[in-house]
Amino acid sequence: MLHRLTTTAAASLLFCCLLLNAQAPRIDKVDPPNWWINMPAPMLLVNGEHLSGARFTVGGLPIEHTSISENGHWAELWLSKDATTAGEITLKAENQQGRAQVPFKFEARRTTGDGNAGFSSRDVMYLIMTDRFADGDHANDGPDAKDSADSAAAKAERANPRGWHGGDLRGIIDHLDYLQTLGITTIWITPIYQNHSPEAYHGYHATDMYAVDEHYGSLDDLKALSKALHERGMKLVLDTVPNHVGPRHPWVDDSPEPTWFHGTRANHTAAIMDFQPLTNPYAPWRDKRDITEGWFANALPDNNQENPSVAKYLIQNAIWWTEEASLDGLRIDTFPYVGREFWNQFHSQLHALYPSLTAVGEASNPDPQIVSSFAGGVTRIGVDTGLWSPLDFPLHYAIRNAFTGSTSMEELAKVLRQDALYPHPERLTPFIDNHDLIRFASEPGGSLAANKLAMAFLLTVRGMPHLYSGDEIYMQGSQDPDNRRDFPGGFPNDKNDAFQSSTRTPTQAEMFDWTRNLLSLRKKTPALLTGSMQILYTSFDSIVYVRTEEPQRILIAIHRGKEGTVLHVSAAETDLAGHPTSSQLFGEGMIHAEAEGIAIELSPNGVLISSMH
């Protein structure tokens, strides 16, 4: 009996201690920070303290189920219904020790026609790494976005090739005239997530997926950029990264669930960058696992999209940015590193809400068979990803090789011949440069003359071309981070301002004028926007093709080399049959009718674009 009393007393004492140590809940953050009426019911991820055992209410909305982390720092509130009336409600967490509450707003959705237009081959996309384009707000510079542009801290950051250089959203807004004059219709900006890490200027190391990093500005700045673009008839594409977060994200050491990531900081595998096993029906899971579950660069925590909570969070995040910033499209980073089932959910839900929204995915590989496997409509190796189009890396590599002289120009035709692998090759996005590769101008053989030929091909071939900021002024740059140089003229005390025609160097002016004139021609020539394509002639140094959209027939002939040439092209049973005469539209050269076709005279490193009739 004495033993039983002692045990009871001990239990009572423990209970009293627990009561004394128990504390009222605290709410620090809610993701998403707001939502919209008549949308899919959201999952609210609540972060705070002492959430274990708390009772939650979200206004009068029914909660389907609640999941709370073991340490009481995270609560997932899965609502079963969305709000139908706009307004502010109260999210509450309550236990015996007290209550925490925060406001949560449901808003009306934007009106139809405000963004979400999507992009197509009628557009020209321009990639901007925000930190390296232009500094519009001189007060948010330096390592912590708290220094003025002329401060020692900001200057030291800018001198660091991997530092925060001060480019921001206001800087992009300030130079929309420049971009529109060039002929750009669509801007793709790198991620603007909060990246509270040194050297994370690029935006791909998120520490908060619902905040704009202070270096870039504010959410209002992003909305202002979107509004300014739409007022000009231009479009906004935002880079999004469902594959991973940054190594300093709070989740890494305090996850909402034990399986929030594939692996942990201490125990994970490195991502494999060979996608071939994903397209091989006979590859075992052993060979595929570390592509979709490994940590990118062995450092970036890999989100576990097979976890329904993670998938819900990431899809909601893309919806939130799309609605909040009136996006027209998405560029999706590291696309093959995420399972196809997730992409199918991701695009199905986005398309249900935004039928015209388009997305282009990064699948960095030179093989069209591999890259095409990730395109929407392809089910030969699994479920349909639903992706509008992958970036055209195979043609990118062929452009590099052909126009730097390292391979035959026939490589261009070899890649284009495999367009049949894609349900929609006209959606592909070819390019010369991007922010992860050595600039064309710095490649062996990457001369100004070669760059001009490559640009002529890029802006006349099928698909939607994308330029990387600086392509139009022959910007150079070797390996990362040198390929991410500041745009000249965008930063205080720049000696060279390439934004202004009067202060461009002769080389910058030559490349800019060449690019602008080609873009002007493309804009007013339907066959170059949406026309069909036939390749009529290839040789080691030359390629001739025709773009046709009745009644237009546009002939493009490109020849590399120090010597001129005459190309004899058969027109029989081609789109040129019966159309032997020409009107020159761009470049230099002559076309003569022959018995079986045409002869094309081209100068050294020559381009000729002509209308055939």
Image (cartoon, rainbow, N blue to C red):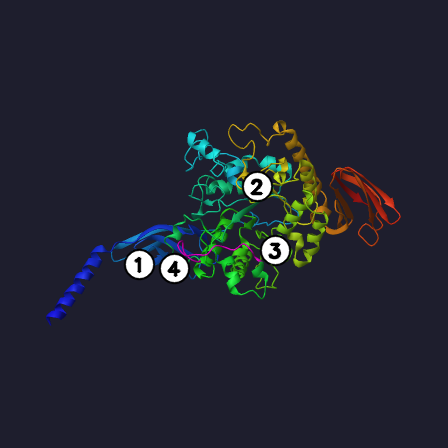
Label 1 sits on what residue type?
Ser
Position of residue 516 measured from the top left corner of the image (x, y, whole percent): 67, 37
**Residue 267 belongs to the span the image colors magenta:** yes
Q: Which residues are magenta?
A: 262-275
Residue assigned mark 1: 52
* Dot 2 crowding, Cα within 10 Å, few <14, some 14–19, many 20+: many
Mark 4–mark 2 Cα distance, whole angstroms, equals 42 Å
Residue assigned mark 2: 229
Mark 4–mark 3 Cα distance, whole angstroms, equals 33 Å
Q: Is residue 50 left or right of residue 519?
A: left
Residue assigned mark 4: 258
Residue drawn where x is 65% and y is 31% of the image: 507
Name, please, the residue furthest toward the right.
595
Residue assigned mark 3: 371
Label the magenta part by its dominant secondary structure: loop
Q: Is residue 58 left or right of residue 360?
A: left
- Secondary structure under tag 4 reads loop
Label 4 sits on what residue type?
Pro
Label 3 sits on what residue type?
Val
For discs 4 and 1, the disc positioned in front in the rendered view: 4
Mark 2–mark 3 Cα distance, whole angstroms, equals 31 Å
**Residue 326 belongs to the span the image colors magenta:** no
Q: Quadrant of the N terminus?
A: bottom left
